[in-house]
Amino acid sequence: MQIVHAPHLTVREAWLALREEVALEPALPIVDAHHHLWDRQTGRYLADEFGKDVASGHRIVSTVYVQCRSMLRRDGPEPMKPLGEVEFANGVAAMFASGAYGPTRVCQAIVGGADLTLGRDLEGVLEAMLQVSGGRLRGIRNPLAWHESPAVSSSPVTPPRDLMENPAFQQGVRTLAKYRLSLDAWVYHTQLDQLYALALSAPDVTVVIDHFGGPLGVGPHANTAEDVRARWTRGLARLASLPNTVIKLGGAGLSVFGFGFAANELPPSSDMLAAAWRPYFDTCLDLFGANRCLFESNFPVDKGMFSYGVLWNAFKRLASAMSADEKAALFSRTAASVYRLDMSGDKE
């Protein structure tokens, strides 16, 4: 099978079923700090589908829903259409909060998608979004990943090249502080310096770096692993020097990372994934420390390359030599702090 680069790999349930693993450390509490839900031509992944993945044997106590342009309002002013996504995620959260669908608090926190270039109108959108969120809105994400090569793409929406340098966008990011909202940022390693400047300009806003900071392995970066890692490490080191930054460990099932597991006859094991991701994990831990790192599934995007249960086993293998306190930070405490989650009912 030849893998053609595309933003999202096709999910093949029968292929994923060829690799089953028993959950390691099944009692360890986990906050899945980054997932999506949608119903698109490319596939359906809603509460039922996610609920089945969450029930894979790991103790997923809570999850964070992140903006993906799902269920936008059909009518009304353009700036208010993203309220539909927040309403949708809040409805899913209410379903799972009832306890009728299992113990996991799915969508306990929501990262919405308000346009941060709106200027004076932004506050009205954020206030309306907070009202429809059921008190669950914790952050905002706008599309930021941009690359000059057409061979690099991970989003159906391509932002302007210099969006992070746009004064209106920068002001919008600073406005988030008024509402205690964080900024989630999915960028490529080639954009880390821009993200550093943005985070530096908004010291009162927590900037959450998505997906290991985006080290690319496709297009012009396909055969330049050493150069990519050096540039990526330098960029992350600068970001780590800022106290208002944290980083999500995950998202490496995105095809832009360049891993070819989806082309194999069998899906990867957790040992294989842990070995492939070890350089990313070790660098992020060295730079940020466990208290500023948080694990994420990035499902269903990453489901094209591995299953949910295998993914969390891979993360547990990566963290196997760490102390109990460090594991608690990586798997739940950092996410609970960043997204202000109530974990009082999830203690053993």
Image (cartoon, rainbow, N blue to C red):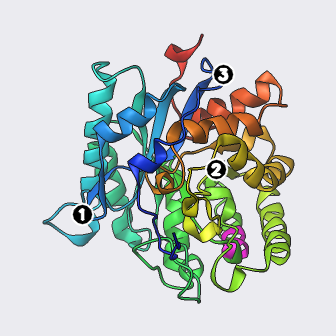
Residue linked to disc 2: 248
The residue under label 1 is 81
Ranked by sequence position, the earlier of labels 1 and 2 is 1
The C terminus: image quadrant = top right
Decide which of tag 2 and tag 3 comes sooner along the chain: 3
Q: Is 83 drawn above or below residue 150 in the view shown?
A: above
The x, y position of residue 287, in whole percent, is: 84, 52
* Numbered circle sitting on residue 91: none
Give, as a three-letter code, the residue at label 2. Lys
At label 3, counting other C-alpha atoms closer than 10 Å, the crowd grade (few under 14, some 14-19, many 20 or more) is some
Q: Nearer the viewer, residue 166 or 316?
A: 316
Q: Nearer the viewer, mark 1 or mark 3?
A: 3
**Residues rendered magenta in the picture:** 191-196
Q: Main secondary structure of the magenta part?
A: helix
Q: Give residue 25's mark.
A: 3
For the residue labelled by badge 1, is the local secondary structure a helix, a strand or a loop?
loop
Q: Is residue 223 magenta?
A: no
> Gap between marks 1 and 3, in whole Å?
42 Å
Residue 64 falls left or right of residue 328: left
- Rendering coords of residue 316 (x, y %): 70, 33
